[in-house]
Amino acid sequence: MIATLTGVTGNMGIQALRELLRIPDLCLRLLILPGDRRTSEVKKLCKNDAERVEYVSGSLSERETCDKLVSGADWVVNMASVIPPLSDKRPDLALECNERGVDCLCSAIEAQERQPKLIHISTVALYGHRTEAHPWGRVGDPLAVSPFDLYALTKLRGERRVLESGIKKWAVLRQTAMLHDRLLRDNLSDGLLFHTVLNTPLEWVTAEDSGRLIANIIRKDTEQENEMGEQFWNRVFNIGGGPDNRATGYDVLHHGFSLIGGGLRNFFEPDYNALRNFHGVWFYDGDALQNLFRYQVQTTADFWTQIKRKQPYLRLGRLVPRQFIKKLVLERLFRDPNSPRYWRAHDDRARLTAYFGSPEAYDAIEHGWSCFRILSEDTETVKSLLNPQNARLVDLGFDPAGEVGLPELSSLAKLRGGRLLSEAGGLYDRLTWEDSDGNRFRMRGYTVLAGHWPNPGYTDYRWDFDRLAKKDRFLAQVWYDSHSPDEDWLYYFNDDFSAGYRKNP
């Protein structure tokens, strides 16, 4: 049995490899990108199992490389992603891996006489920004990628390619926010740190648990292949961390800075971080994968305990004056193009509008924390919000607990301001639809059921949700949690991937 892994040098990939090496008689084929600095770490991990590990050097966007990867394989686990901040600095790499690479991989699998099964890792970022108005989400919710998030946009396109592919057995797993050993170092190296909205809901899973999930899927498919069937294959799932791993954006930053003797309030100011245009949600259906594969072991508390043990040097920060750390660690990031302070200094009105509502709204943020509400400090409200029984879920237009057929899909299309035109067909058939602009398109019923619906982001670098939400009541349910119906902006990337925006005509 052969499992092919891409993205094996990533945080999830390393842990998946570690777990898969524990499965006897499983051979592994690993994609290695030339020049990847973590290749030596991978080879060291595989040193004692060299006879059952094969390395394929190349890029996911090369058809010859993809053919080598998939030929004779039983499973292909695609964990390859170019993520922020690299995707912001090198959009060409994000396109090459997250979009073109997925297309190339799918084409190679489709061409196989004996197709391997594909496990494709997607992302929570597809759901876009959420607030306490709708903190809970599930597969089927609107996919509203935040403006200027090229990573999420390319992952959206890649995911749709899998759902619409000719691959016989696939599964798409939308990964939530991930805790890993390099978290603090990675987040303190770029202005992306300030994109975290303090009051947004975030569900975390550790890299170790994510790797355990991949291994448990392959174990179960090997031992109970007949039982996997409709339970898993040809479905979309959310990779959640469980009840103990649900928090807000504030919490992870607060816990991280607590390691060096303080907390978020001691090092940050209210205007450091964005007020909207992030991503994060608590997964209402996160137990679906857990019930199948029992992978959730670690909590966020376990993670921070682990970080204290593995990175004891962080405690030395307690000996350094906080103002010095603030200047040395945080204020140096104000010069980074991903920082809101940089946007203001360079009059990037497009991003200030997307992330704050307007440049004027950014300027109006008061200094000092006395006037800024921190949701996680409102314990009674958070306790109520965290109770799934109180969850305010997005209306899908039908009851997802029942059978889903053409009548239910038709209701969903009407909620989106469009129509289902096909009068016959099943969930995995390509059906004919009409969107809210009157454009006809073909898409599988299940793809629509998983939250996909045409918008300019699928073909161009445009975010037109202000206009679309006025006609799409499904999208409007979450879009207007952080946007005003009076807003009517079209956000876009220019040819050089600089940010632009204009009023809709």
Image (spheres, rainbow, N blue to C red):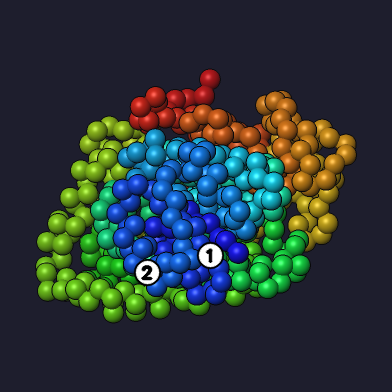
- Left or right of residue 390: residue 39: left
The residue drawn where x is 71% and y is 72% is 224
Dot 1 falls on a residue whose secondary structure is strand
Of 67 and 386, nearer the camera is 67
Q: Residues within 10 Å of mark 1 (few under 14, many from 20)?
A: many
Of 86 and 221, nearer the camera is 221
Q: Residues within 10 Å of mark 2 (few under 14, many from 20)?
A: few
Q: Residue furthest right?
A: 424
Q: Which residue lies furthest to the front in this view?
A: 51
**Res. 96 visible in picture:** yes
Q: Point out which mark residue 27 bears.
A: 1
In the image, what residue type sits under mark 1?
Answer: Cys
Quadrant occupied by the N terminus: bottom right
Mark pair 1, 2: CA separation: 14 Å
Of 117 and 391, nearer the camera is 117
* Image quadrant assignment for residue 305: bottom left
Q: Mark 2 points at which residue?
A: 47
